Amino acid sequence: MSSITDPDTGSFRLSMLINDTRYRSLTFQAIAAVILALSFAYLGNNLIQNLRQAGLNISYDFLGAPSGYDINQTLIEYDSRSTHSRAAIVGILNTLLVAFLACLTATIFGVLAGVLRLSNNWLVSKLMAFYVEIFRNIPVLIWIIIIFTIMTAVMPAPRAFRGDEPEATMLFGAFAFTNRGIYIPAPVWGPGSIVVVLTFIASIVGIFVYRRHATKTLYETGRLLPTFWPSVALLFIPVILMQLILGRPVGLDYPVLGGFNFSGGLQIGAPLIALWFALSIYTGAFIAENVRAGIQAVSKGQTEAAGALGLRPGRIMSLVVLPQALRVIIPPLISQYLNITKNSSLAIAVGYADVTATLGGITLNQTGRAIECVLLLMLFYLTISLTISAVMNVYNNSVKLKER
């Protein structure tokens, strides 16, 4: 057996930076940091010199100039007279919207497919295996184009809803599925609507508190409290009562066919639906494999012990196996959420105006400020990725099993 011994402590000498193990790692890290800083300085100086020779300089003044182009779907007010910076904000919000929706639905698809793939039913398990293998082995760009093409080719045009005997009819008189997207009722916020919204948020918090109480009661006393119907009652009854008491402050604006298209209501464009659905089913296939691996990582002894206590298979999965499996899969789940956010940059293939399409596409082409636009894009994706990673790591640390 070999052992490493440090030199005797005494006055500091320069040779100790290499020979003393207490300082050697710090010395090499300092040298690497200096080399890295010099490399970035050389590249930055080279960039500035080349731009100066070409008569260019790095400037972000173009962000205050009028954009001069329209965006088909926006979450905030915007028109062609707005500035490039506002167009970039519209693109950022659209990116965050589709990333949030896709993360949510991909998690649902992935958990369901991962659980059902381990089903004892041969047909169900093979169907889930078929879904996983088909979707994760074909690039997401192809799925985006396929879904968008199917939507625009199969769904009826708005004119099909016109006439005494229309070719298509609205669902419940409120939802219209067209090749331009889906039209749904839009909320109308009247005086007092904030109270209804706060009641709804309080109801959701109450559901989490009640379900936590039910779980604690089960673990401490073995008594199983009902959760489904109380949760439904907590979600709807307080909101409905508050809505009636305040005189229905929250209304609905229904879409109405007028001219060549629907007016009123809220339009969810076909590009957004295609991108959202494609990202969800594609990433859901990867999450399904993570869920399957997490379930198989739980000891079978726990399943057998739960069965010996008289729990049914569904209860064993929801109360014993799945809670532990979901804790295990959080680290790979972070990577999948990051992939969804970055893959949303493929939105330009179907005309969805995300930040890559606005700032990195039209604005870049109009202004010629390629370096500035690319730097801003890199900063945005780096910031949002680090934020997602940090939030999920905090959540992972809060729910992971504590071992001594």
Image: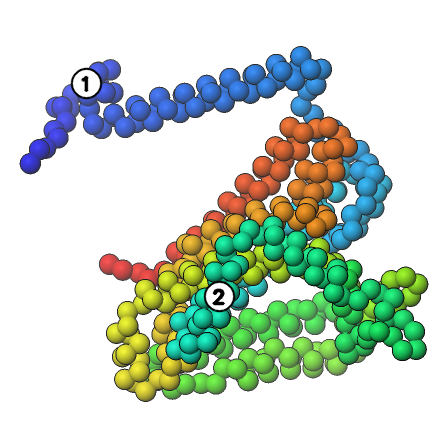
Label 1: which residue?
11
Q: Give whichever of 97, 194 is nearer the camera.
A: 97
| Label 1 packing within 10 angstroms: few (<14), some (14-19), many (20+) | few
Disc 1 marks which amino acid?
A: Ser
Disc 2 marks which amino acid?
A: Phe
Q: Secondary structure at mark 1?
A: loop
Q: Is residue 180 left or right of residue 258?
A: left
State the mark number for residue 130: 2
Q: Is residue 212 left or right of residue 157?
A: left
Residue 221 drawn at (x, y percent): 34, 84
Q: Is residue 80 left or right of residue 275?
A: right
Please, is residue 76 above or below residue 4 in the view?
A: below
Q: Quadrant of residue 81?
A: top right
Whether residue 265 is visible to the viewer of this picture, yes or no, is no
Q: Residue at x 69, y 80 (%)?
A: 240
> Residues under labels 2 and 1: Cα distance?
70 Å
Q: Give whichever of 367, 154 is nearer the camera.
A: 154
